[in-house]
Amino acid sequence: MLQTVRMHLSAATRRRALAATATAAMALSISCAGSASAADLPVWDDYSYEGQVAVIETLVKNFEAAHPDVDVQRTQRTFDDLALTLKLAVSAGDGPVVTKVNQGAKDMGAMAKEGLLLPLDPYIQKYGWTERQSDSILARDRWTKDGKFGTGETYGISSLGEIVGLYYNEKVLKDAGVSLPLKTFEDFLEACDKVKAAGATPIAMGTAKQHLALHLLAGISQAHIDASKRSELDDLIYGRGGSWQTPGNVESAALLQKWAEEGYYFDGFQGISGDDAVQLFIAGQAAFLTSGTWYFGDMKANPDIHFMAIPAPKGVEHPLSVGGVDPAWAITALAKDQATKDLAGSYIDYMVSPEAAVEWAKAGYLPSTKLPDDANIDMTPLLKEGVAIWKSLNANDAIGHYPDWSSPTMLKTIDDNMPLLLSGRDTPEAFIGKLQADYAAYLASK
Amino acid sequence: MKQSVLDAPVRKNLIFVLPGLLLYSAFVLGPILAAIYLSFTEWNGIARPDFIGFSNYLSLLTDSNFVTALKNNALLMVFYCLLPLFIGMAFASIVRSLKGREQMAIRTLLFMPYIMPSAVLGIVWHWLYNPAFGPINQILKSVGLGAIALPWLGDFNFALPSVGMVATWYYCGFCMVIFLTGLQRLDPSIFEAARADGAGAAYTFRRITLPLLLPEIRIVLLLTIIASIKSFDLIFTMTRGGPANSTLVPNIYMYQLGFQLNRYGYAAAVAIVGAILIFTVNYIVHRFVRPADGGSR
């Protein structure tokens, strides 16, 4: 009898437990479903450096505080991982609603063409983003349905500006007898010669990984182009024609090759990665480094390091500087309903707001949105130099382009052939010819 | 005699195989079939794949990068297969002659690289080879050999051997262990008889040890050939196929085509050709490297 009662109790307890579990599960699923449809915002970004992570986490917290019903589900990826996974994830229907996406044909162009990104033009008008960033910058996020770059609807907007310029170590230059500031390209060449003669390394270079050589090539080439004559470069990047086979490109390639042959780079630069070369430069092992403003945070470690645009040759009044903006914020096709699209638009609006720009500047990064005039920011000397150059470039419409945007395969073509140029196995003409062949093949395929 | 449940007809036993078969189909067979299908298409990873027949395979025939990748892979086989085989056999002979703790210590030390993830080793060796910070060049310079302190992974001639030497270092411990087990399997009386008949060490090795170790040699060749053809992680972490494709192998090329250039159909064709190569080379090894009596293990 006792056994029977225990069994009955046990069965009753089990039933109650089951019912309670089922109720709890239903309640949980209802609450989850409710939050998923109302206020979950999956976001992918590529802010993976320590300083960047601190800023973006602050910005996300601020946004959530201003939108208490929104849960931003942020996924952090490196630049390379983002490029590898984004298209496949969104096309499989299991990716972010808001994402960073790299401009150019390979990523943004391909996604816009396939309808995986939504145009941001309604939000540009609604929030007045054209007041914050120049049209020349926003043009880098424009694509037509038939794959024309630089025109059509706008699919993204960026938080950070980027300038590829000339870092220089004041102490190394002064020790070599170089007088500053460098005003012309000829001054830069003369400074390199003096540093070499003094027994130091003129230019920090590492070609095993990253793209320092590409930045040096493009930086020199574009510094020879006046902003008033930029149309051919714009045509090249936007796939409207243009050519790689310009005297400027060939001469720049020849200069890079000459410097490699005459020992102007680090000893063994072919086996050193770009990041390692940057660390050597920070340690005072070279006089110059051509790279982007994204290294501002690292450069703070050495107060002798300063930043300037690559100086132009005489006669070029407003030289172009390679650069533009970091990968853009975009809304994916996974934003199905208007409420989700508007939420995504509002998130991006905050990310490119003056308030966000101030947060980036405080952390030493160059915001692409104009800083408020009354912003009280204790900027690092490097950032002050960067902001001044950014303002000047914007005012003169002199922000150049990353040349690898000219075709989806250009970066690989450059990576494959740059070692051949620097080792003297290819002539400058042959090297530029290969880039032109890649570009011509892309134009033919469009 | 009581019958086993497995003595039932095949169709009834299929139920026991079904869970494994489903998992195999989902994670192995399905992707293989998908890769075969994709290799006949042009697909950018987003839009619908376009069926293009054998075009990808025909393009591979005239693709200079693919030919370079195959040549590099053939060269790497020296470092992945032949050198570990010879060095592993030598190590096995040496270790076998040691006793007790000495043998265990040396055996463990030589085998240790094999238990490490090869991607981690690639990163470590990338640092060791670094011309600016790496200890290899620092040592060379400190002993007056600065002239041969090369940018190992950035030099067209030395990048492939530099990567290959790491593979040799990685696999020779594994080969040694296989040969050690083989040597332990051999009957000592055979060697005593050879010694009594006046056979020298070299003669004994060539005419007795080597033929008796053929089953182990075959296993080592099969496994290292598979490893060499599917090599990816070491090269990816050390050179990514550079400089200028001098360490490019089919799997790196497949990765670049798919994930950097969005040519997934063409990348799948590279993968299928790589798989066919593995089957072909291994069939040749399986067919021709076997004991004289034709026995197979």
Image (cartoon, coloured by chain):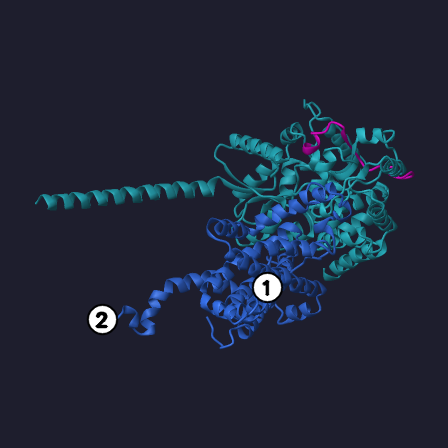
Chain colours: A cyan, B blue
Sooner in the amino-acid sequence: mark 1 or mark 2: 2
| Magenta stretch bounds | A297-317
Residue A107 lies left or right of residue B290; in this view the side is right
Q: Which picture quadrant has residue A21? A: top left
B14 or A72: which is nearer to us? B14
Camera sees residue B51: yes
Q: Is residue B201 above or below residue A247?
A: below
> Which residue lies most toward the left here?
A1
Q: Are marks 1 and 2 in contact (CB under 8 Å)?
A: no
Work out which residue is located at the far right of the displayed protein and give it: A315
SS at mark 2?
Answer: loop
Give residue A380's position: percent from left, percent from top. Answer: 71, 26
Mark number, residue B2: 2
The answer to which of A90 and A247 lies nearer the viewer is A247
- Tell me: residue A268, above or below residue A431: above
Rendering coords of residue A423 (x, y %) = 80, 52
Question: Residue A58: which numbered mark, if any?
Answer: none
Quadrant location, the C terminus of chain A = bottom right
In the visual, does B46 lie left or right of A131?
A: left
